[in-house]
Image (spheres, rainbow, N blue to C red):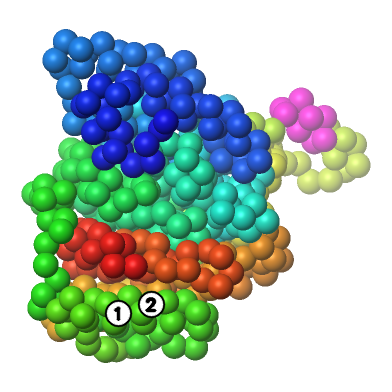
């Protein structure tokens, strides 16, 4: 018995009905039985997890407990665990081992969490379907012909498939919230700066956030109490006090002002998703919440702004993978041989070093990553910088001011998480633009830096749950958790 939520497992541990070791063994059995079918875990740390569990059990016997003892976690393979592979689901880093722990890993381990393995994702966290992994697509455990969402699809699927209590993901434009919606679990993207990014492999540094997935809002609250907080190793982490998140759950919604931004309910939203959300809104109103429609006029520019700015940051962040310093390196002998042959044909002389960069990056990165590096290099190039990058920065400010204005009128915003239910594997891989549009309701939170919580509500005729998104003021995760918990219990 694994106890699907950590809260239940914790009660069972306290009643001596189970042990950390038994919890880990049981999750390992599920992984052994089902991982091949869904392609969720890239590495499973069987021995490490069992050893840590036994150690925690022996400590508990001696009266040394820890707040998260017995919490079994999956970790997206873009987060560093010392001496473990961190592949970013890329050929480029396949086999590369982390030299240090991410701050979130060190804090969680200290609190008693057990890491059971690294989860599959889109390569370097770029994607919305988990089909961009060098190690193959992840399948949605609710229906394996469908995508689990991306880029943290493995983490969402691991929780949905009962392979761990909770998991860590990263969210740059929706990568926690969209897969949470597609797999029917809870996912939180914290405020930018709320959780340390130290040890998260960078995609777009002014957008990236680490956050949790779990079955319940209570478990997410529990995790956030440990994850959140300033870190001297991350200069962008904020010195804002961390509340006792679990204590806010269960409070009254009376008088709470909930905003429905018109732009999130317009054309393109699946009619059944709209209907399910409207039902929830009705129930919230019956609980005494005040519902207000409002406008966030720059929402439509979200996707374009996001893809200009994040590709620019990515092109710079990913320049470190040069075939020299880390990861994949093209075969030097082959390069030398090819250059020698070119010389005999009288072609212009190229340096071995240049060819090493070119070949390593050509073979080491997948299609989507290369597309973004090229886009990003283009928008930053001298002739186009003003027209694209600088302009997008200004639009980012406008999008942020939409949020500032909205939060003068309401306490929290309620929106869909995704415009459609999960789509079949392979159905959008030929059309990157269509794929990018699946992030339309999530990218704005990253542009503005505000927190976003997705919870599963109701049922869609396709059989999948519907994801409801709550967006809040900077550092107001507590209110999102309170409302999200109430929403889940109402629906
Ligand atoms: N799906 C979005 C993208 O492809 C978001 C990715 C993310 O949040 N890491 O960029």
Q: Nearer the viewer, residue 96 or 246?
A: 246
Q: Give the residues drawn in magenta, as a range.
A: 331-339
Q: Main secondary structure of the magenta part?
A: helix
Q: Is residue 358 visible?
A: no
Query: In the rendering, which numbered label is found on residue 277?
Result: 2
In magenta stretch: residue 333: yes
Above or below 341: residue 45: above
Look at the numbered disc 2 and give the secondary structure of its residue. Answer: helix
Q: Residue at x 79, y 30 (%)?
A: 334
Q: Is residue 25 visible?
A: yes
Q: Is residue 249 left or right of residue 6?
A: left
Horizontal and vertical percent for residue 311?
49, 61
Q: How far apart, in angstroms, are the residues tagged by discs 1 and 2?
A: 6 Å
Query: In the rendering, which numbered label is found on residue 99?
Result: none
- Residue under pointer 1: 281
Badges 1 and 2: C-beta atoms under 8 Å apart?
yes
Quadrant of residue 285 within the rendered picture: bottom left
Q: Tell me if mark 2 has few (under 14), some (14-19) or many (20+) residues whose alpha carbon lies within 10 angstroms of its own.
A: many
Any atom of ligand 1 within 8 Å of the CB at mark 2? no
- Most distant residue in the right direction: 345
Q: Is residue 90 left or right of residue 482?
A: right
Horizontal and vertical percent for residue 486?
23, 64
Above or below 179: residue 419: below
Q: Residue at x 36, y 82 (%)?
A: 278
Q: Residue at x 46, y 22 (%)?
A: 25
Q: Tell me if mark 1 has few (under 14), some (14-19) or many (20+) residues whose alpha carbon lies within 10 angstroms of its own.
A: some
Look at the numbered disc 1 and give the secondary structure of its residue. Answer: helix
Q: Which quarter of the figure is the C terminus placed in?
A: bottom left
């Amino acid at each position: 018995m694994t106890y699907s939520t950590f809260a239940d497992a914790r009660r069972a541990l306290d009643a001596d009905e189970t042990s950390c070791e038994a919890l880990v063994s049981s999750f390992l059995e599920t992984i052994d039985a089902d991982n091949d079918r869904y392609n969720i875990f890239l590495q499973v740390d069987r021995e490490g997890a069992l050893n840590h569990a036994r150690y925690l059990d022996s400590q508990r016997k001696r009266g040394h407990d820890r707040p998260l003892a017995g919490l079994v976690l999956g970790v997206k393979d873009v987060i560093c665990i010392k001496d473990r592979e961190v592949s970013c689901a890329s050929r480029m880093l396949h086999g590369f081992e982390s030299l240090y722990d991410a701050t979130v890993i060190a804090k969680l381990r200290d609190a008693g969490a057990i890491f059971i393995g690294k989860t599959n994702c889109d390569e370097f966290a770029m994607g919305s379907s988990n089909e961009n992994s060098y190690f193959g697509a992840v399948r949605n455990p609710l229906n394996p012909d469908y995508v689990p969402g991306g880029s943290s699809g493995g983490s969402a699927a691991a929780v949905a498939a009962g392979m761990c209590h909770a998991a860590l993901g990263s969210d740059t434009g929706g990568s926690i919230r969209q897969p949470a919606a597609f797999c029917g679990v809870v996912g939180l993207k914290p405020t930018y700066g709320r959780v340390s990014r130290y040890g998260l492999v960078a995609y777009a540094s002014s957008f990236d956030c680490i956050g949790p997935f779990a079955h319940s809002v209570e478990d997410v609250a529990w995790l956030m109490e440990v994850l959140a907080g300033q870190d001297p190793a991350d200069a962008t982490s904020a010195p804002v006090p961390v509340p006792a998140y679990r204590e806010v759950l269960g409070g009254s919604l009376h008088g709470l002002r909930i905003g429905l931004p018109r732009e999130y309910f317009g054309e393109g939203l699946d009619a059944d998703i709209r209907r399910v959300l409207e039902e929830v809104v009705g129930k919230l109103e019956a609980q005494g919440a005040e519902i207000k429609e409002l406008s966030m006029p720059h929402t439509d520019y979200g996707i374009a702004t996001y893809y200009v700015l994040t590709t620019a940051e990515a092109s710079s962040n990913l320049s470190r993978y040069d075939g020299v310093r880390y990861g994949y390196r093209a075969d030097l002998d082959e390069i030398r041989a090819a250059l020698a042959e070119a010389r005999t044909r009288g072609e212009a002389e190229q340096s071995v070093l240049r060819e090493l960069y070119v070949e390593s990056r050509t073979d080491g990165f997948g299609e989507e990553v290369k597309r973004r590096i090229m886009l990003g290099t283009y928008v930053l190039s001298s002739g186009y910088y003003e027209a694209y990058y600088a302009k997008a920065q200004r639009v980012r400010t406008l999008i942020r001011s939409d949020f500032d204005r909205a939060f003068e009128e309401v306490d929290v915003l309620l929106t869909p998480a995704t415009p459609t239910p999960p789509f079949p594997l392979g159905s959008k891989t030929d059309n990157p633009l269509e794929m990018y549009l699946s992030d339309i309701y999530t990218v704005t939170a990253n542009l503005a830096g505000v927190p976003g919580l997705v919870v599963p509500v109701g049922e869609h005729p396709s059989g999948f749950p519907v994801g409801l998104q709550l967006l809040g003021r900077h550092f107001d995760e507590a209110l999102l958790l309170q409302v999200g918990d109430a929403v889940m219990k109402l629906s």
